Image (tube, grey):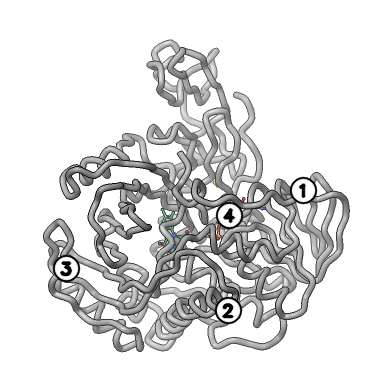
Amino acid sequence: MNSIWRDSVSLPNFPSLDGDKKTDVLVVGAGMAGILSAFFLQRSGLSVIVAEAGRVGGGVTENTTAKITSQHGLCYSKLIQEVGKEKAGQYAMANQQAVEDYFDLISEQKIECDLQRKNAYLYTLNDPETAMTENFAAKQLGLPSRFEPDLSLPFPTAGAVEFKNQGQFHPLKFVNALAKQLTIYENTRVETIEEDTAFTALGNICAKYILITTHYPFINVPGYYFMRMHQERSYVIALQNAPGVNGIYIDMAQDGLSLRNYQNLLLLGGGAHRTGENHMGGNYQRLRQLAREYFPGSSEVAHWSAQDCMPIDQIPYIGTYAPTKPNWYVATGFGKWGMTGSMVAAKLLCAQIIGKGSPYTEVYDPSRWNLKSAASNLMDEVGHAVQGLSSTVVQLPKTKTDELPRGHGGIVEHNGRKAGVYKNDEGRLFVVSVRCPHMGCQLEWNPDEHTWDCPCHGSRFDYQGRVLNNPANRDLSES
Ligand SMILES: Cc1cc2nc3c(=O)[nH]c(=O)nc-3n(C[C@H](O)[C@H](O)[C@H](O)COP(=O)(O)OP(=O)(O)OC[C@H]3O[C@@H](n4cnc5c(N)ncnc54)[C@H](O)[C@@H]3O)c2cc1C
Ligand code: FES
């Protein structure tokens, strides 16, 4: 099902690439990060081309909840501990500035995108001490924070960290207004990049600078982003006849709820899990159950899900792609806070490319190595990769295709071989290889969405094997 954003705006169709091109800047990927970066670079006088594998805004950006805030979950006390007060302060200021940059740009460009000022709340159900510590950390870094003991949510809370004057908007109305001013080629997947040239099936694009804003970078070496990020999925339902909550909310706990209104709707989010680890499913059902409990009389008008890249030290990678590729740039690892993250990226990459410099270069440097936080998370990433790879070589599965119930999918023995099989409600079989084309890990069936998901780095494929989310850059083969 589409998000409410995709269904409430009609974006123009952009042409596909039609032969070779030359430009100052090539931006690969037309999500929030790519479109904002292209806009600022073009405004600084450079010629810019955007190549998009699918539709503009059709990646994570159309499935976001679009809160514009420097309040990024429970992050500032941890950041101070792990990267020190100076860098934590730079992160805080970059994102707080990004909130204001949205308000300025939307006002300057007269963009009608339902932008509203809202206070942001990081609430807790049972741990006010941790919330107070977070409030203290945020205040120390200069953020507009205070502890709010009483919230009027329809379930009991034990207080919240309040950030004043944050925002919310309609992400695709915003993207649409900027995209109309750019040269974009849709349905144009960049297959590979060599030095100053990007190769697609429809022609090659030669550029002085190449920005890789493809959500998860699809080039493994150099960069090695696959060792430093995984993806996390979460689920959203849109409710009508639910009360207004007058603010943007997120639970301090990892398994808690996110809330915001859009017009007469309430968006309720939750059910976060590492992509590829949703064997039991039931995430939408759990949200629906909570909606019945907290918002009786409400009814669902839409549901959707999406995933974002989670860097090992909580800080996105924005800057030069790798020391050996000084003309390639990257913006990734937004950790589910890619609205301000994309604005920070666009401003920072633009400053770096036009040689202006920025106080935020070091904290976001993709080549950094924050030892305190990174070491244990890096081992965790390696552990997942080893597990995902070894699963592909163990013996045949116990279940055979005949035993698979209708409407279900799974890894089964099919014609004497291991295969991924989905049996639809009519009994028709869709058979795919369960080997991920990115780096070979074994895919897992996601019963909530009828997709094949990779636990290693988060690539996803529909039941027919068509790639939905990168880093994989091609479809699954038949088994
Ligand atoms: C459920 C959920 C809720 C969220 N809510 C919030 C929120 O409230 N506030 C917030 O700040 N953040 C939020 N986020 C995070 C935010 O939505 C993302 O970080 C942001 O949208 C990422 O934008 P992007 O441009 O990096 O990626 P995308 O929007 O995915 O754009 C990448 C584009 O690159 C294209 N592409 C990929 N490979 C290629 C290729 N080889 N060639 C050409 N094009 C290619 C894709 O088709 C895609 O269009 C949320 C995330 C999730 C999952
Ligand atoms: S996403 Fe990397 S192996 Fe599947």
Looking at the image, is mark 3 or mark 1 earlier in the sequence? 1
Residue occupying image coordinates x 61% and y 52%: 11
Q: Earlier in the sequence, mark 3 or mark 2?
A: 2
What residue did someone put label 4 on? Answer: 57
- Cα separation, mark 3 vs mark 4, equals 34 Å
Residue type highlighted by circle 3: Leu
Disc number placed over residue 16 in the picture, else none: 1
Q: Is residue 457 visible?
A: no
224 or 337: nearer the eye?
337
Q: Dots 3 and 4: beta carbons under 8 Å?
A: no
- Total tally of numbered discs in the picture: 4
CA distance for labels 3 and 2: 34 Å
Mark number displayed over residue 151: 3
> Of marks 2 and 4, which one's residue comes earlier in the chain?
4
The label nearer to you, 2 versus 4, is 2
Mark 2–mark 4 Cα distance, whole angstroms, equals: 22 Å
Q: Is residue 161 positioned above or below 401 on the image?
A: below
Dots 2 and 1: beta carbons under 8 Å?
no
Q: Is mark 4 within 8 Å of ligand 1?
A: yes
Which residue has dot 2 on it? 108
